[in-house]
Image (tube, rainbow, N blue to C red):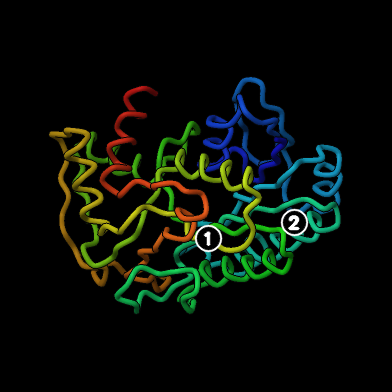
Amino acid sequence: MRLYITGIAGLLGNNIVKRLVNRCEITGVDILDLDIPNITYEKFSLYEKERLRLHIAQVKPDAVIHTAAAVNVDECEENPQWAYKLNKETTGDIAEICNELGIKLVYISSDAVFDGESEELYQETDLVNPLNVYAKTKLDGERLVLNHSRNLVFRTNIYGQNIQNKKSFGEWILSSLEEGKVLNMFEDIDFSPILVSDLAEIIYKALEKDLCGLYHVCAAGCITKYDFGIKLKELFELKTGNINRVQSEMMHFKAKRSKHMGMSNAKISRELEIKIRTPEESIREFRRLYDEF
């Protein structure tokens, strides 16, 4: 299988490379440097549409995995033009290119498209109601991608090991605690975080089976941000640092955020005949991989 990854140097991009490099031919594009043996990629901006079109056409991938995005929620709120250009317009360009070339597109979306008012785990058929610019632009991207029936959209929320210098959410918690810091973490916001290496494997399985449409790819069940931090501290046996239980209202974010982002993975689990880890099982696997790294 030949894969083309946008944002190949990012958290998901570099984990796809790490997990699948021995099973797939992988290349892609990023504006950042990536130092992984046996991987070639181009360094340019996704705004260069014609250059992107030519590169994808030359590579002739079986699928394009579009991981590149503006993901800082408050930065998107402060600079909506940037967010819309990268998350909506560029996604539309990539969808257009893939459609013209007859290539499947996998788009990585977000659990933020929901308003958090439900008391149940969100399913793919539930109504969306994005509360901020980031969520709106990701939803716009979904719709552009799903205009073409062969494509695939995964809503998710990832953490894990980043081979680049930028830390994932889980790594930020660990490094902060190791430095003896006190963290304030929300007891009133829950989510269904999936280990990024698990998501990479699920993407591969979904492409092998040629799945199309919209799927929630997340942990089995949900956990509060506070409990997630506490579990990390416990399972990594950290004696330094501390975590305070706080309400999200204490923080004066620029962007409004959903308090309940827990999603159901029943559909993808059924389609691929897999069992996805719970948040605690995921953290245990994170610890195992962290020790091996």
Q: Position of residue 165 (x, y in %)?
A: 47, 34
Q: Does residue 62 appear to the left or right of 74 in the view shown?
A: right
For the N terminus, the quadrant is top right
> For this rendering, which residue is in front, 53 or 205?
205
Residue type beneath disc 2: Ile
Disc 1 crowd, CA 10 A, few/some/many (<14, 14-19, 20+):
many
Identify the residue at horizontal 24%, vertical 48% (top origin): 229
Quadrant including the C terminus: top left
The location of residue 187, given as percent across then percent down, is 21, 63
Q: As displayed, is residue 156 above or below residue 43?
A: below
Q: Nearer the viewer, residue 68 or 282?
A: 282
Q: Earlier in the sequence, mark 1 or mark 2?
A: 2
Q: Amino acid at mark 1?
A: Tyr
Question: Where does the image place residue 262, in percent across and percent down from the top left?
Answer: 35, 64
Q: Which residue is mark 1?
A: 215
Asked if residue 215 is positioned above or below residue 11 in the image, the reply reads below
Q: Horizontal and vertical percent for residue 22?
A: 61, 24
Query: Which of the labelled discs sits on residue 94, or is there none?
Result: 2
Residue at x 80% of width, y 44% of height: 56
- The answer to whether residue 200 is above or below residue 269 is above
Q: Residue at x 65, y 70 (%)?
A: 143
Question: Residue drawn at (83%, 49%), measured in percent from left and top?
Answer: 53
Q: Is residue 85 above or below residue 34?
A: below
Q: Is residue 20 left or right of residue 179?
A: right
Q: Residues within 10 Å of mark 2 (few under 14, many from 20)?
A: many
Could you tell me which secondary element the residue under label 2 belongs to? helix
Q: CA distance from mark 1 to mark 2?
A: 20 Å
Q: Can you tell which of label 1 and label 2 is closer to the viewer?
A: 1
Residue 31 sits in which quadrant? top right
Using the image as rendered, state which of residue 68 and residue 183 is in the foreground. 68
Under circle 1, the secondary element is strand
